[in-house]
Amino acid sequence: MKKLLLIVTVLAIPILSCTTTVTGAGVIYDESIPLEQSSHINVSNFGRITAYNGLTVNWGGTIQIPAGNTLLEANVYSQIGNTVYSGKGLLLRYNFQPGKYYFLRAGRAEGSSTVGIRIYAYDIGEKFTSSWSDFEAHFVEFIHFLNTDSGETPVLN
């Protein structure tokens, strides 16, 4: 039994490595768009995308879309520590850059009670570690939901 546990542990070490490469998408909106003209968006810790530029969709995980100015509608469910952010039909507009892998997270603006979207970006193929400091070093921008009053949102916490 101890030998089996040792074998499983040794095999699990590469799997649990703290360095990952950002690649791949679960949903590819348009396969005819070359990778270098696309953006990847990871919404695993954000919620589900329910509309893309006015088209009804049901996307979770990682999506690949053409880069550019994009309007997304989302049902947000995001937990950071003990705080839960949730809301339905929340709109966000962002100019996603080509060759980037984005992480979206609901959260607060730095030093504020305003809730919106925290955007983090890596280059596609870039390695990242599972450390919070590495993730925060890739913070790009905080944006408000479009369909809320002055950044105050129906998002609960």
Image: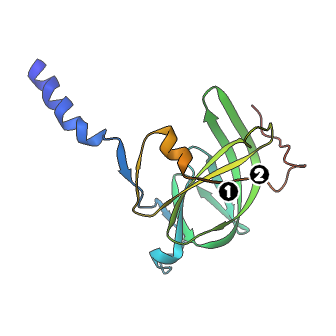
Q: Position of residue 3 (x, y in %)?
A: 9, 23
Residue at 72% x, 41% y is: 110
Name which residue lies at 63% across and 39% down.
78
**Where 154 sits versus 33, above or below?**
above
* Secondary element at image label 1: strand
Q: Is residue 29 left or right of residue 156?
A: left
Residue 22 or 26: which is nearer the viewer?
A: 22
Crowding at label 2, few (<14), some or many (≥20) Cα neighbours within 10 Å? Answer: some
Give the Cα separation between the discs numbered 1 and 2: 8 Å
What residue appears at the point 62 percent right and 50 percent down from the top-left corner? 48
Secondary element under disc 2, as helix, strand or loop, is strand
Tell me the tag on residue 100: none
User: Residue flagged by tag 1: what amino acid is it?
Assistant: Thr
> Is 100 on the left or on the right of 17, as rendered?
right
Q: Amino acid at mark 2?
A: Gly
- The residue wearing badge 2 is 89
Q: How many marks?
A: 2
Question: Vertical placement of 46 versus 101: above or below?
Answer: above
The reply to whether callout 1 and callout 2 are in contact (CB within 8 Å) is yes
Q: Nearer the viewer, residue 44 or 36?
A: 36
* Camera sees residue 1: no
**What residue sits right under mark 1 in the picture?**
50
Q: Residue furthest top?
A: 1
Residue 119 image point, x, y percent? 63, 53
Indicate the position of residue 99 as horizontal and vertical percent values.
49, 70
Residue 22 visible, this angle: yes
57 versus 85 height, above or below: below
Q: Residue furthest left?
A: 3
